[in-house]
Image: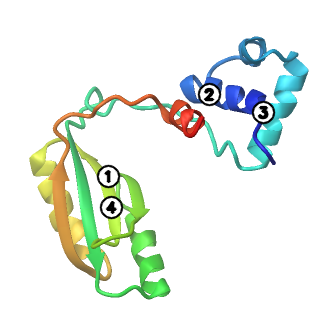
Amino acid sequence: MQIDRIDAGILQCLAADARSSVSAIAARVGLSQSACTRRIQALEASGHILGYGAHLGHRRLGFRVTALVDITLGTQVEEDLAQFERAVGEIDGIVECALVSGAQDYRLKIVCRDLDDYERMHREHLGRLPGVNTISSSFVLRAVPTRGEADALFGYGA
């Protein structure tokens, strides 16, 4: 499915506020509600929209520490990668996991209540993950606001 200007507008509306009504999106992109609904369904079916969710205020919820954790495994065997990924998926507090290029194999984003909570997670979970060779942690001091996913994607190369 090729994304045109109207589809891009729909994606920008939904990325900015996934709770936007179809009528509001339709008005913004110049479509009828039924045509807009069909476009949204097509974007979902094609995998351009993977789901809908809320951005949570981690700090407001009591998770005051965000750690970026780089992990290097002992091997690059597909079975070992899959075993590591399954284990990571079972640990509360890991909000993102990415297989990355470079010196490390994975980058995790972890939210914790405080440094003691992170130390517990490191001791009880990270250090016990299968195949781990090295762990390197950095702590987020301040998250810098960005333009947002849809604006960054559809402004790219324009």
Distance between the alpha carbons at the discs numbered 1 and 4: 7 Å
On the picture, is 99 further left or further right than 154? left
Label 3 SS: helix
Query: Residue 42 is drawn in which quadrant?
Result: top right
On the picture, is 27 further left or further right than 155? right
Few, some or many residues within 10 Å of mark 2 (<14, 14–19, 20+): many
Residue extending furthest left?
A: 116
Residue picked out by circle 1: 109
Tell me, yes or no, whether the two marked residues, 3 and 4, touch with CB atoms within 8 Å.
no
Can you tell which mark lies on residue 12? Answer: 2
Distance between the alpha carbons at the discs numbered 3 and 1: 30 Å
Q: Amino acid at mark 4?
A: Arg
- On the question of residue 89 being in view, the answer is no
The image shows residue 93 at horizontal and vertical percentages of: 32, 50
Tell me, yes or no, whether the two marked residues, 1 and 4, touch with CB atoms within 8 Å.
yes
Distance between the alpha carbons at the discs numbered 2 and 4: 27 Å
Can you tell which mark lies on residue 107? Answer: 4
In terms of sequence position, does the residue under pointer 3 or pointer 4 come before the other? 3
Few, some or many residues within 10 Å of mark 3 (<14, 14–19, 20+): many
Q: Residue at x 34, y 72 (%)?
A: 105
The image shows residue 92 at horizontal and vertical percentages of: 35, 54
Nearer to us: label 2 or label 3: 2
In the picture shown, does residue 100 fall above or below 1? below
Q: Quadrant of the C terminus?
A: top right
In terms of sequence position, does the residue under pointer 3 or pointer 1 come before the other? 3
Q: Residue at x 40, y 85 (%)?
A: 76
Distance between the alpha carbons at the discs numbered 2 and 3: 12 Å
Residue picked out by circle 3: 40
Q: Amino acid at mark 3?
A: Ile
In terms of sequence position, does the residue under pointer 2 or pointer 3 come before the other? 2
On the picture, is 147 further left or further right than 150? left
Label 2 SS: helix
